[in-house]
Image (spheres, helix red, strand yellow):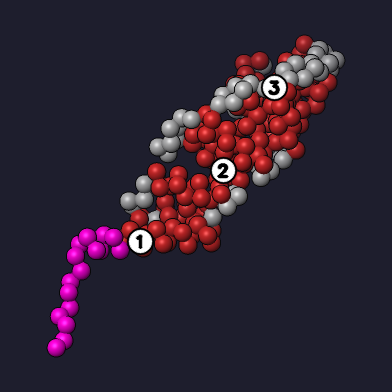
Amino acid sequence: MLLKYKKRSPMFDKKFKIVLVLGIVVILLIIFGKRGIEAIVSTDKISTFSESKLIKYYKKSCEYEDSTVCNELGDMYHYGRKTAPIDYEEAVQYYTKSCELEDGKGCNNLAYMLNKGKGITKNNWTAIRLYKKACKYNEMEACYNVGSMYYHGEGTKRSYHSAAYYFQEACDNGIGAGCNDLGYMYEHGKYVKGNLHEAMSHYANACDMGESSGCNNL
């Protein structure tokens, strides 16, 4: 006797789709890492992929030592994005992981948390060293931050010479705040010889880069 074909129940179809989606997620994650995750998010056919699941697979990608994703996870917990709760200690953990993987943004963000005492004990001595590390990884915002700490004597002895060096490095690589602060040093003769023309030139560069302080100082 032939068995009669039994139609699958809607519940079976739903479970099958869930398993299929998760299978696709894992395959894309293994093959493409973060790009695989982004492909999932941008695919219209999988509209039910929630942000909470996105965080789950970001964590998996971070475990696979994707430094960029580790840093982004830190941002999620730092600012409360993608349904992640604001949790500074959790943010510090992911920034630390990212920095250990030699990611400049991760080191810069970890230094910021140390500088502000967010989720970790305030420690400017360690913060400036992490900013320097990030600067070596070509994270230009970190170069500016090193200059700022030298200028104000945070975590290190005040050094206008070192401040000017790092402000120049940041300015030369598109950080308007670096140009503005270098202009201020020229205007007021901080380490560099007072030179109003040079100051105006740096303020103008800062303004062109979208730094409002530079525009105001012209």
The foreground one among 149 and 97 is 97
- The alpha-carbon separation of the residues under discs 2 and 1 comes to 26 Å
Quarter containing the C terminus: top right
Res 195 seen here: no
**Residue at numbered disc 1:** 19
Q: Position of residue 206 (x, y in %)?
A: 67, 25
- The alpha-carbon separation of the residues under discs 1 and 3 comes to 48 Å
Q: Which residues are magenta?
A: 1-16
The amino acid marked with disc number 2 is Cys
Q: Residue at x 81, y 23 (%)?
A: 162
Q: Position of residue 163 (x, y in %)?
A: 77, 22
Q: Secondary structure at mark 2?
A: helix
**Residue at numbered disc 3:** 124
**Residue at numbered disc 2:** 70
Q: Is residue 189 left or right of residue 64?
A: right
Quarter containing the N terminus: bottom left
